[in-house]
Amino acid sequence: MKNIKKALKLVTLLVTSILIATASAQVYTYMYLRGSITVGTQKIVWIMEGQEVSGDTVQMSFNVEPNVTKTFNGTLYLKNKDTDDHTVNITVTDKVGSQFETCKVYVYENFTQNGSWTLIGTLDLKTLNDALTNKTLKADGYYKFDFEIKATSNGTDNDFELMVIYA
């Protein structure tokens, strides 16, 4: 008799658990999101010495003599390969050291076929966070980066970095 009561309690608990589980399962509604990702080509690219650079970083080296101003023209470009215009911000995120009298980047734009370049701004590589902001790089357009450098002496803080952000 005692075993029958225990068995009935166990069966009652089991049936109750199944009913609760069934009721709980019926409360939930499932939804799904299916998507796909297409990996396209880079919309804005660096062009250095006439060659497109893959990736988002370009490395340049300049050789200058103390107390001689040297310019580097037509060595680096930024090209918009997209069919849409993009807003561009260019910022000095790492500056050169005090041994430079002049260390500037002149940024020009060209959106025409005849090669006419227009200065849109100058960045001083001696000034951290110097920036050109909210510039428009038009579809199929270019920015050209020309450098002017004059070192007063040899030094160890010769590295700089520009960050380009586009939307």
Image (cartoon, rainbow, N blue to C red):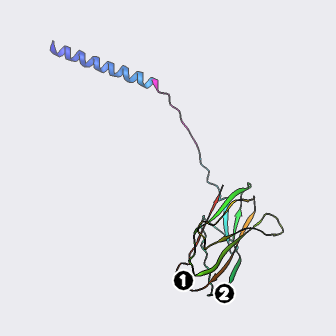
Tag 1, which secondary structure?
A: loop
In space, the residues marked 1 and 2 are separated at their CA atoms by 15 Å
In the rendered image, the vertical position of residue 63 relative to residue 48, given as above or below: below
- The magenta span reads 27-35
The foreground one among 90 and 57 is 90
Identify the amino acid type marked 2. Answer: Val
For label 2, the residue is 68
Identify the amino acid type marked 1. Answer: Gly
**Residue furthest left in the image:** 2
Q: In this view, does 17 lie to the left or right of 40?
A: left
For label 1, the residue is 155
In the rendered image, the vertical position of residue 41 relative to residue 71, given as above or below: above
Give yes or no for residue 167 being in the magenta stretch: no
Q: Which of marks 1 and 2 is nearer the N terminus?
A: 2
Q: Is residue 21 left or right of residue 158?
A: left
x and y percent of residue 58 in the render? 61, 70
**Residue furthest right in the image:** 114
x and y percent of residue 37 in the render? 59, 48
The foreground one among 35 and 109 is 109
Q: In which quarter of the image is the N terminus?
A: top left
Q: In this view, does 18 lie to the left or right of 92?
A: left
Which residue is found at the position 37% from the left and 19% from the top?
Answer: 19
Magenta span: helix, strand or loop, mainly?
Answer: loop
